[in-house]
Amino acid sequence: MIRVLLADDQALVRGALAAMLGLEADIEVVAQVGSAAQVVPAARESTPDVALLDVQMPDGNGLDAAAQLRAALPECRVIICTTFGRPGYLARAMAAGAAGFVVKDSPPEQLVDAVRRVHSGLRVVDPALAAESLATGVSPLTAREQDVLRAASDGSTVADVARRLRLSDGTVRNHLSSAIGKTGARTRAEAARLAEERGWL
């Protein structure tokens, strides 16, 4: 029996995934959580073989939760299961130790197959996303450029971003300028949008 933990902030999606997986004779959903912070505690309690994690959740993301889960329970294999099939997310998921990456609009049998294959020790990645990821490449942004771009994405002024990140105004301007250049954008708002679409933020 393959023991599965589900983490998705949308109760309807979580319930549908649990119902679908529950139809399989060799799969048992042993835990369901709605936030990133609940993943590790629930996994410690339920000892799943495979964890299906969404990317975007209200109190964090599945990519960070994947890394935390791999550190806490290395025997638990992780599949990122998300609506957002972005190349940058795939690279970050693999870096976090995920063994699989599937998008939610995949046919149900593909998700079930992914659970079984990941449980058996294989890696499973959506083929179209893998091809797009190779074409797009890894994120060119440094960690600090990502921080600054993320902080500026809500329209905050340079001074606001500098104060929030404890940097000088000039340093913030330099990071924003570099991020704009690397994304090929014309403005910081466009740079933030492009970086988000590519899964770099």
Image (tube, rainbow, N blue to C red):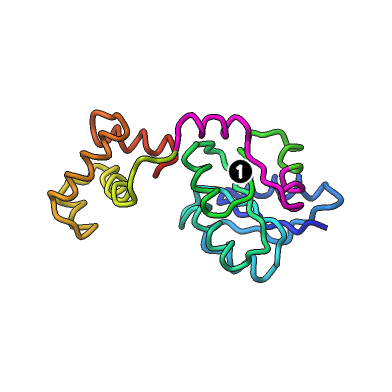
Farthest residue toward the bottom? Answer: 45
Residue that appears at 52% across and 38% down: 84
The image shows residue 46, relative to residue 154, as above or below, that is below
Position of 54 with respect to 198 (left or right) is right
Q: From the image, which quarter does the C terminus lie in?
A: top left
116 in the magenta segment: yes
User: Which residue is painted at 45% across and 31% down in the image?
Assistant: 136
Question: In screen coordinates, is 162 left or right of 48?
Answer: left
Residue 39: where, in percent of width, then height? 58, 62
Q: Which residue is mark 1?
A: 101
Residue 161 in the magenta stretch? The answer is: no
**Is the magenta region chiefly helix, strand or loop?**
helix
Crowd rating for badge 1 (residues with CA inside 10 Å; few <14, some 14–19, many 20+)? many
Q: Quadrant of residue 178?
A: top left
Viewer-side residue, 102 vs 181: 181
Q: Amino acid at mark 1?
A: Phe
- Which element carries disc 1, helix, strand or loop? strand
Q: Position of residue 19 (x, y in %)?
A: 75, 48
Residue 42 placement: quadrant: bottom right
* Residue at point 50%, 36% (across, down): 86
Q: Position of residue 167 (x, y in %)?
A: 18, 57
Q: Which residues are magenta?
A: 114-137
Q: Quadrant of the N terminus?
A: bottom right
- The x and y percentages for residue 53 are 60, 51
Q: Is residue 101 toward the left or the right of residue 135 in the image?
A: right
Q: Is residue 13 above or below residue 69?
A: above
Please report the residue visible at 46 percent of the width from the left and 56 percent of the height from the top: 60
Query: In the depicted view, which residue is nearer to us: 95 or 150?
Result: 95
